[in-house]
Image (spheres, rainbow, N blue to C red):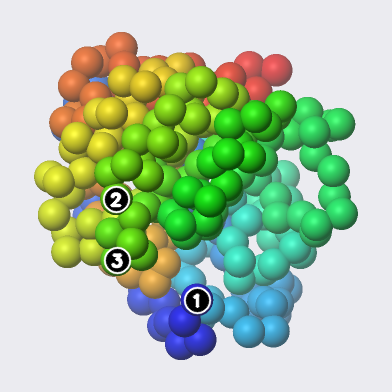
Amino acid sequence: MSSTILTSKPMRDAGTLTRPAFSMPGEACDSHAHVFEAAAKYPSVDTPHYTLPDGSLEKLQRMTGVLGLQRFVIVQPSYYGTDNSCMLDALSAAGARARGVAMVGEKRRTQAIGWHVQFYTPGWVVRDLLPFLAGLNADFVIDHMGYMLESDGLNYTDFDRLIDVIRGGRGWIKLSAPYRLAKDGNFERLKPMARAIIDAAPDRIIWGSDWPHIPEGGKDTGTLLNLLSEWAPDAEARKRILVSNPAKLFKFEE
């Protein structure tokens, strides 16, 4: 990973976001967002990869309100390491509409308490983990459509192997952060990949915005949400991705 510290840019005002191009189902969930609050209360790790983002819980709630996302999942960012205090305080403030994904130390055991494991890692690590993940007796989630970049030497064969593991095991995969895969902004070329994911395991796909889009806070979250109208043109498929699938994974109904 680069040692360069990225400068986080100001957050786009929620009122300027592109509105959904499709009818949003009730209880729709953003399954991948982050929250950052005042540095005086929540210090960062010693060497964060980016400066403090403009991503408070208040701004997250404004974004989700504008886009009709009634639920959200706060994923612990690397900025805070294994100190999950900011995320836990945000969950307490947000109430029943929110869930969280914590970062834990190597000795923390999660299966015994019924947690799933989330992998945010370069695609080449995902590829190397596939034999292990194929036999993993626990639910796991792969972020950012597998994060398999051609620039890292990955190819369609690697992606097909990932799809086979998701289809045949206990894996879930997240349609999130397309700009981290298509760095040139050409999201059209991701459509075959997204549709292959949805076809492989329609009941284990979730969507996430990756808000506040570190370090590019000015991105239009609405345009990212609207990619679902092309990736999953069927309304029932979108409802699974936005509502029933995250409700099952994150136990919103309990």
Q: CA distance from mark 3 to mark 2?
A: 10 Å
Measure the C-alpha gap from mark 3 to mark 1: 14 Å
Horizontal and vertical percent position of residue 245: 49, 21
247 relative to 240 in the view: left or right: right
Mark 1 — residue? 1
Q: Is residue 207 visible?
A: no
Q: Helix or strand or loop: what does disc 1 sit on?
A: loop
Q: Residue at x 42, y 60 (%)?
A: 212
Does residue 39 appear in the picture of this structure? yes
Residue designated by label 3: 151
**From what the image shows, is residue 196 above or below residue 122?**
above
Q: Secondary structure at mark 3?
A: helix
**Mark 2 surroundings within 10 Å by alpha-carbon count, few (fewer than 14), some (14 through 19), many (20 or more):** few
User: Between 72 and 48, which is closer to the camera in this rendering?
Assistant: 48
**Residue bearing mark 2:** 155
Choose between 234 and 129: the one closer to the eye: 129
Circle 3 Cα neighbour tier, 10 Å, few/some/many (<14 / 14–19 / ≥20): few
Q: Amino acid at mark 2?
A: Asn
Left or right position of 171 against 27: right
Instruction: Name the spot of residue 43 as percent of width and height, x first.
Output: 70, 77
In the drawing, does residue 95 fall left or right of residue 180? right
Compared with residue 146, is residue 46 higher up or lower down, i.e. above or below? below
CA gap, disc 2 and disc 1: 21 Å
Residue at 27% in and 35% down: 194
Mark closest to the chain's N terminus, 3 or 1: 1
Q: Quarter of the image containing the C terminus? A: top right
Residue 23 picture quarter: top left
